[in-house]
Every structure is written in structure tokens, then in C-alpha cells.
Amino acid sequence: MTVAKLSRPQKRQLGQFLTPRFLAEALVNGLDLTPQTKVLEPCFGDGAFVLPLIRRLMELHSGTNRQRLEQVLQENIFGVEIDRVLYEECLARIADEFGSLPKRHNLVRADFFRHEFRDDWHFSPATSMLTDLVLFDVIVGNPPFGGSFDPAIEDQLDSEFGVRCHLKIKKETYAFFIVKCVELLKLGGQLSFICSDTLVTIPTMKGLRTFLMNEGRVTVSALPEFSPETEYSMILLDLRRSGPTDLVVRDRTAIPRSIIELTGNRSWGISPSLAMLFAGPKVGDLMVGTSGMTIGKNDLFVRKVQGEEIVEPYWFEFVDERITLEGERKRARLGKLSHAREAEILKAEAEGRTRRTVRAHSYDVPLRIRIPHPDYKPYNKSNGQLIYAKPDHVIFWKNNGEAVLTFKKTGNWYLHGVGGQPFFGREGLTWPLVAGRFRTRYLPPGYILDSGSPCGFLKQNVPKDELFFVLAWTLSPLCAQVLKSVINHTVNIQSKDFERLPYPHWVDPVEKEKAIRQTKDLISRANAGQKFDFDSPEILELGRFFEFPQSKTAPAP
């Protein structure tokens, strides 16, 4: 894909972040090509990679310009592009530079996941099986990032590409592109992709990282610049398909796989200098991380505390709603229902069955309700404060949340689960989901959990003081470094990121007790109204407890 402007809705749907031509040419010029090389560009856009490939490959053939162009387009270059406008623009650019295209060529307009290039049956050394698929020496390009799958084949694709090495491959366009392309490489073949740097650390890409390490030698390099079209950081991923590897090279640093395995999420962000931190227990050995609940319409049930009261605009009524096939389809994932489920619903509809639902009605004059109140529970909305904060939101939770849970159960399919429900009301830690580092605070008992503020809770029989020790650890500069360089460098901090943190086993027991006492004191001071930030002397002092002893190898700054 190259620099061209499409309407934003279409770009988002197709996951298009178009490659500058200078970058595509530089990548193509670094490929090892011969007159026999078969090259695939699985999303070629208007030809950023295709045109420099044609130039290079034509230099390797003999004959007239016309003969060389025919050889390259019929024997060497294969490509797929889903976007009609970009496809036609690419063919027009080829014709402008090299002359009209031959009647037969291998540049097709199609969905890459619906198209296969076929050939005579042959034995594939990469799979040890007979196949009629064309296998490639080189696959190059910039796969779509964050795009949408065709709903008609989405589940099929998840079944086909969603698991490798007994691990989940995230249902993300660039991830599925990579899996399919690697498996279309010949043994010894090269894949060279520009892709999102989310591949390097985020937990949901653990399966893809494992798959790549099992397929060949992996090199990843940060791109200092990509394109004004996106602020996302990008990397160059290079894989030589040669079987399992015992190291990954990241920005010219060799990282042994044995160190990568220590991280839990098989992060390529680990470095030898940080390896010792991961050699001991993890925070997840003592605590469980969890997300909270997605309500679907917070305005109906969540109220901001104003002083010592809230304003309640609604009252709730439970009614019986008729079950219909049309209604159930609207709630179903991708609007699809199995034949058996449709038959059940049609029977229920014919019998006039109903489902209990909840409706909100506005008061003529909103009520002012003093908090605390038995019908409301503290709600763990993200607020970004450190150490501790008094509850600033509550949720309508009469009869154990009957109205909220009924609303979710009768809503769209993705609302039916109640995230974090076993931990509602428990004492723990919490932090904002979206943040540059942990902004952790103590969570007293009694809260209902919100999806925007993940939480951590002690496992059974773990001493309570560990809660305060881990709270102090998460606020330290070293923890911030580990989180953002190894565990998850994006601005999302998931509950599993929390579990994968190394537990600070290097802290002396005496110093550990001091850190716990100071943390408890800070919670008391925060409860009395004092606020802290990362520059507060008290927070900086907590961080010093977790610095590496001088006798050990210190982590890189």
C-alpha cells in the first residue's frame, strides 16, 4: 500500500496505513532476488512495493523490455489488493512506466483471505506435504493494521488462523496476514513486513511471537519514521523460514530465547540487563488481575458524587418483553444465529414467551440522595490518583444490581458477561486502563468494578501486607521501565500485564517492611485529603526501595 488518500471510514475498515514510496523502495533494494524468485505482495495498494520489484527483477532477465516485463509479471511477481481504486491505480502506474500489461499476469483484485495462487501439484519441503499452492521465496509488504474482516468469513478465518503452537493468535488483520504469509513461504524463504510495533510486547501477541520463533530466524527493527498518516510506531519484521530459533535480534541486539521465555508473555522487549528481574516469582504468583464490568450505558446507572450526595434522574421498571427472532438477531454476534437457536426462538415467539427487561423512566424532578445509601455501591471509575482516593462515583445496585444485570443480560451479546464479578466488594489495588505507567491506588472493600480500571486482588492465604508492598512496587520508576519496555509498551495496562510483573524478590526483608509501613502511612494521609504524584518526595522515596543492589547487575537506564 502506498501514499494515497482514501476516505477515513474506508481506510479504517481496510486497515490502510499507506507506505511511503522511499521506504518501500529501500526495503525492496535490500531483498535477495534472482531470475527465479517468486515474490508475493499480499496487499499491494497502488504499487509502492510492486513497481520497485518490477524494476529490480527486470534487470535480472534478458530480452526486450516487453519480454522482460512479461517474464516478471507472469513468473516472478504475485500480488493481491482488495481496494478497487488502488488496484486500478497500480495497474495504471505499471502501464505508464513499463508499457501495457500482458494479458496474463498475477496481480489480482481480491480479498487476500479468499484468494490462493494455484499451480501444479508439488511436494512442499516446508510442510512435508503435497500441495497445489504456489509457495514463495519472498513475501514483502505492509499488511493492514486494525482492519475489519469480512463478517461472512470472520469465524472461518478465526478457525483457520486463530491458533498456532497451542496458543491464541489475536484476531487482528496484520496477525492473520503474517500467519498466512509465513505458511506460504518456501523453506529458506524470506518474509519482510512493515507492521505495527504492538507485535513486540503486548500480551495478546504472545501466540504470534511464539509462532514466528518456531518458524525461523526473526529480526525486528524500529522504524525512526513511517508516515504522516499515522502516529503509530512501526517496525520492520524480517523472518527467514528455517525452523525454530534460539534467539531474536531486536535493533541489532541478540536476545536469547531462554530470556524471552522468562517474561511470561514471551516479550521481545526483554534485554539481558533486565533478565534477572524475571528470574524469580511474578506478581501473578501472589495476586490475581481482573478487568471490571462493561455496563453498555453508564449514564443509566452510574452517578457522580457531589459533596455528600448524588442526583438521580431515573426510576426503573421491570417489564416482560416478547421474544422475537428479529430482536434476537439484533443482539447476536455478527447478527448470526445457529439453525438450532433460530428454531428455539421461533418456537418461543410462536408460544408468546417473554423475557424480563428493565426500562428507565425520568423523574419530573431528579432526586437528591445522600451518600452512602443502601441502594448504591461505590463504583471504581478511573481517576488517575495515586495511593488512595475516596469514591467519586456510585452505581445503582439495589437488590444486588438487579437493574444493571438485567439490562446487560437483555442487551447485545458482548454485554452478557459480568467482568470481575467474583471480585466485587473485595479489597485490592486498581489503576487506570489507559495510562503511560501504573497509577496505582488502594481499593477498599465494597466496590463494584468498572472495565476502565483493572484491579489486582490477593490470592487465598497470601498475607495482606503483600498488597501494600506490591502497591509500592508498581509506583516505582523501575516498575515503569519494566512495564513499558518488556511487558506492554502501549498506553493500555491490562490486568494480565499486572500479573506478569516480576515480584521484587531482590528487596531486602528489612527494606520490604519499611516500604510496607510507609505505604500504609501514605494511604492514611491520602484518606485525610493529601494528594500525591510521581514527583512527590514520598513517592520518590518509595521507589528507592526497589532499586537494584550494587552487587547485582543494574538494569539499563
Image (spheres, rainbow, N blue to C red):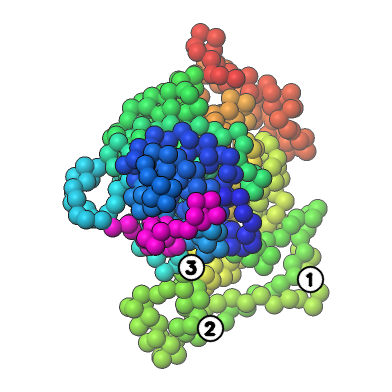
Asked if the residues shown at circle 1 and circle 2 are in contact, with their CB atoms under 8 angstroms apart, the answer is no
**Residue at point 63%, 65% (across, down):** 297
When the figure is inspected, residue 30 is found, relative to residue 198, above or below; the finding is: above
Q: Quadrant of the C terminus?
A: top right
Tell me how far mark 2 sits from mark 3, CA to CA. Answer: 17 Å
Residue extending farthest front: 64
Label 1 amino acid?
Pro
When the figure is inspected, residue 550 is found, relative to residue 255, above or below; the finding is: above
Label 2 amino acid?
Glu
Residue with the mark numbered 3: 413
- Can the viewer see residue 314? yes
Residue 76: % across, % down:
36, 47
Earlier-in-chain disc, 1 versus 3 = 1
**Residue at point 71%, 25% (across, down):** 538
Give, as a single range, the part of the protein colored magenta: 93-118
Going by the image, does 123 lie left or right of 254? left
- Does 110 lie within the magenta span? yes
Per the image, label 3 sits on a secondary structure element best described as helix
Going by the image, does 359 lie left or right of 220? right
Earlier-in-chain disc, 1 versus 2 = 2
Going by the image, does 83 lie left or right of 541? left
Q: Residues within 10 Å of mark 2 (few under 14, many from 20)?
A: some
Residue with the mark numbered 2: 321
Tell me how far mark 1 sits from mark 2, CA to CA. Answer: 27 Å
Per the image, label 1 sits on a secondary structure element best described as strand
Residue with the mark numbered 1: 366
Tell me how far mark 1 sits from mark 3, CA to CA. Answer: 32 Å
Asked if the residues shown at circle 2 and circle 3 are in contact, with their CB atoms under 8 angstroms apart, the answer is no
